[in-house]
Image (cartoon, rainbow, N blue to C red):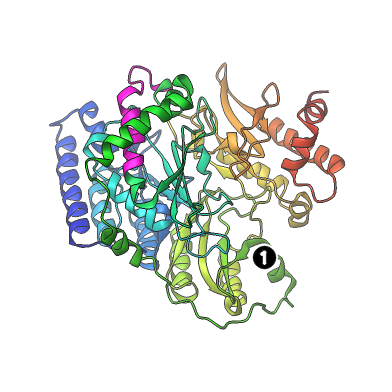
Amino acid sequence: MYQYDQYDQAMVDARVEEFRGQVARRMAGEITEDQFKPLRLKNGLYLQLHAYMLRVAIPYGTLNGRQMRMLGDIADKYDRGYGHFTTRQNIQYNWIKLEDAPQILADLATVEMHAIQTSGNCIRNISSDHFAGAAADELVDPRPYAELLRQWSSFHPEFDYLPRKFKIAVIASDTDRAAMRLHDIGIQIVKNEAGEIGARFYVGGGMGRTPMIAPVIREFVPALQMVSYAEAALRVYNRYGRRDNKYKARIKILVHEIGADEYRRQVEEEFAHILTLGLEPPQAEFERIAAFFADPGLESGLADGYDRSDPDFAVWADQNTTPHKQAGYKAVVISLKPAGGIPGDATADQIRLMAELAEVYSLDELRVTHTQNIVLPHVKQSDLYALWQKLDAAGLATANLDLIGDIIACPGLDYCSLANARSIPLAQKISARFAEPERQRALGELKLKISGCINACGHHHAGNIGILGVDRKGTENYQLLLGGSEAADTSLAQIVGPGFSEDGIVDAIETVTNVYLAQRADGERFLDTYRRLGMAPFKEAIYG
């Protein structure tokens, strides 16, 4: 993983001290809340319903044991003993005191972490495939390119006050594990007919009030011109993006309104101009960055296979481990979705344990997934059983990856001042209703996502089953959506019909799954059956 040099550390340290002064001025009454708000947002500090929330950046979801241990310590020292891992591969703390915020940032800086640009109308955390560097199906490790874009975008003066927040994802596999086409810019590392590495650019995706799937804007950009093309794409957006209406301010609206062809024409024109300025990073700088992502010490000559005599372990290994590019290894997904639990939450002790397990079993690497789980990317198959025993003892061995119990949920109305309805209690009720492991496995792959408002932080548009919390005349109400996907077969879920109460939506989901079980063909996932049958049989079963 990337390590700070003297310039990185000095930049982060300077930001900490700057914010320390801003907080002191706010607490002394020298600046108003309106004056302070843009300053705190630039440092990831939100004011929510009950307290301040701090969002910490985890670039492309990668961190080491030392950093993970610090996240656990912060949860104990400054919060209520837990943290919440998010769909942006970050972590949030929901009970922060304003006077503590500068010291939290100072503590983070000691382990090369920060909260810069985790909020505000700027380029947010660059996300990526959580199996990057380990996946058996990737072309190259996409993280050096993500890191290059992170360095380019941090404190970029031209893009510090965009019309709206901006999100970029980078992958290097035909299997999309980062919801790439639902980002403002999605980049897939590809190889052209000449065998050269470059990037395919998708621009104009996103969820929220007006969900859209990003179209391809350019099939191939040479690798070291990627930054220039991203700059061109953002310049066109910065020039024409709506600043008069925040609901129409995202780049997806611009691409939709002027059309992908016209947007592409203007980006190409801007790109040609930028190429004359020599802004591309030199090859030597990319190689310096890429060196941090070299083989972390994987052993060769290891045999595949492990003892499966413990049936509980075998179920977990089948469900929560994935193939690795190196023989004898697996990538392990630690589920943060226990039956009846809060999706994405982990206690301070669990966070510190995961740090220790990464150091012992995963070459000191962890990843945060956009589905609110944690990955140990490099685990020897011979260590799987010992690892599982320790996870099981800590309540971290739920075998539900990609099943109905692996729920994505935003914090909702329990914390968020923007939410219309609670997400957490609903997620817990659904989890409890489908808690039986055999029932989950019988349903197979079924991705359920819950958002407490139209902003879609729970990615409900991309759920095979999606749930949107709305306010109906002062009462919490839930809309049911079906047919979404965030994978390479990206699709947007559609609303089934009138909404439900909290208990009613749980019953409706059970009805939907019963229709699926009765109608599915051999080998069909829920999404396959829905696409074959359409909405009608599900709607009829729910509403009569």
Q: Position of residue 320 (x, y in %)?
A: 63, 62
* Residue that lies at the very extreme toward the bottom in this rendered image: 301
Q: Kindly tell me whether residue 501 is visible in this rendering.
A: no
Please state the horizontal and vertical placement of residue 222, each as a whole percent of the image: 39, 49
Instruction: Choose top left, top right, bottom left or bottom right for residue 73.
Output: bottom left
Foreground residue, 309 or 244?
Answer: 244
Question: What residue do we see at 66% from left, 28% from top?
Answer: 494
Q: Does the magenta stretch include residue 233?
A: yes
Magenta region, main secondary structure: helix
x, y percent for residue 417:
42, 30
Q: What element carries label 1?
A: helix
The residue identified by callout 1 is 316
Q: How crowded is mark 1: few (under 14 residues within 10 Å), some or many (20 or more)?
A: many
Q: What is the quadrant of residue 88 in the picture?
A: top left
Which corner quadrant holds the N terminus? bottom left
Q: Does the magenta stretch include residue 476?
A: no
Question: Which quarter of the figure is the C terminus placed in?
Answer: top right
Left or right, residue 343 beside residue 107 = right
Q: In this view, does 541 lie to the left or right of 504?
A: right
* Residue plotted at (27% across, 31% down): 161
- Can you say whether 142 is above or below 390 in the image? above
Q: Which residue is drawn at 24% across and 35% down?
A: 158
Q: What residue type is labelled 1?
A: Trp
Q: Is residue 167 shown above or below 161?
A: below
Q: Is residue 280 left or right of residue 430?
A: left
Furthest-front residue in view? 194
Q: Magenta residues? A: 228-247
**Residue occupying the point 23% across, 55% down:** 106
Say which of 342 and 323 sits in front. 323
- Can you give x and y, in whole percent of width and height, for residue 403 in the image? 68, 51
